[in-house]
Amino acid sequence: MLVTPELLGTFPSLKPLPLPLLQQLAQQSTVQRFARRGVVLKAGVREESVCFLFEGRLQGVDFTIDGREVGLYFVEPGDFCGELGMFDDGPQPEHVIALTSAMVVFVPLASLRQVTREHAVLLQRMGERLAARVRQMTRQRSLLGLPNVGQRVCCQLWMLIPESGRSEGNQTIIRNPPTHMEIAIMLSLSRESVSRVFQLLQAREIVKRDGPGALIVHDLVTLQRLAEGAEEL
């Protein structure tokens, strides 16, 4: 599959660029498909491209000293990763893996750096995304300090709800929710511990699975109280 200017224009960060620049970037970019658990970016390696996700879902992961996998953040369609190389010459700090079958567009760092010299909007978008990811990872790290497993899982679910979804009455939907195993990796828990919390949430009709692609949150108020520690399961 060839990278076209139209394909690059589907990414919010690249959409503001003029068509001639998109055409230039398209000629220098490549697209690659990854199977589930495929490694998109390798930690400790100086990557030469920023990865734009067209379809699927990616996750940034690291490993503890004792070898346990810890999830850091998700990458959704339209988003990108590997942008740290835009700002320094250091190696990629974490692995990025495919959680599902994924299609990724690789845009050379050198080309993007050149574009930012004349189009500051791209640098601004990348800086905003980098800041958002730092904030997200800081919040994610704070969850690991919660001693109550139920609160930890509820906090993770609350963080997965977009800001707009938190104000949609008392019910919302988390699209393409992570699996119990993926949540366990994010929270440094066992899959069994996460499954027990979900059983309690479902028994109280706070959440309900709607197939693999959606998790219905029936009671936003209670989920928020559980996440804040004002109530226990």
Image: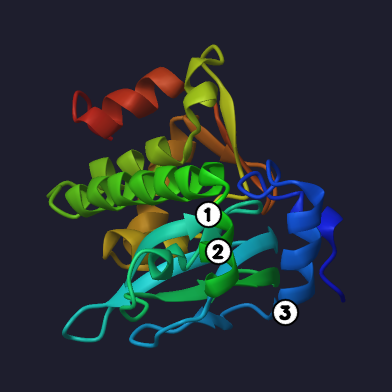
Q: What amino acid is found at the position of numbered circle 2 in the picture?
A: Gln
Q: What amino acid is found at the position of numbered circle 1 in the picture?
A: Thr
Q: Are marks 2 and 3 in contact (CB under 8 Å)?
A: no
Residue 56 in view: no
Residue 125 position, x and y percent, is 50, 44
Q: Are marks 1 and 3 in contact (CB under 8 Å)?
A: no
Give above or below for 222 relative to 203: above
Residue 1 in view: yes
Q: Is residue 55 left or right of residue 156?
A: right
What label does residue 32 carry, if any? 3
- Camera-nearest residue between 10 and 15: 15
Give above or below for 145 relative to 85: above
Spatial separation of the CA atoms under disc 2 and disc 3: 23 Å
- Residue that mark 2 sits on: 114
Q: Secondary structure at mark 2?
A: helix
Q: What amino acid is found at the position of numbered circle 3 in the picture?
A: Gln
Mark 1 Cα-neighbour bin, 10 Å: few <14, some 14–19, many ≥20 = some
Residue 203 position, x and y percent, is 46, 36
Spatial separation of the CA atoms under disc 1 and disc 2: 6 Å
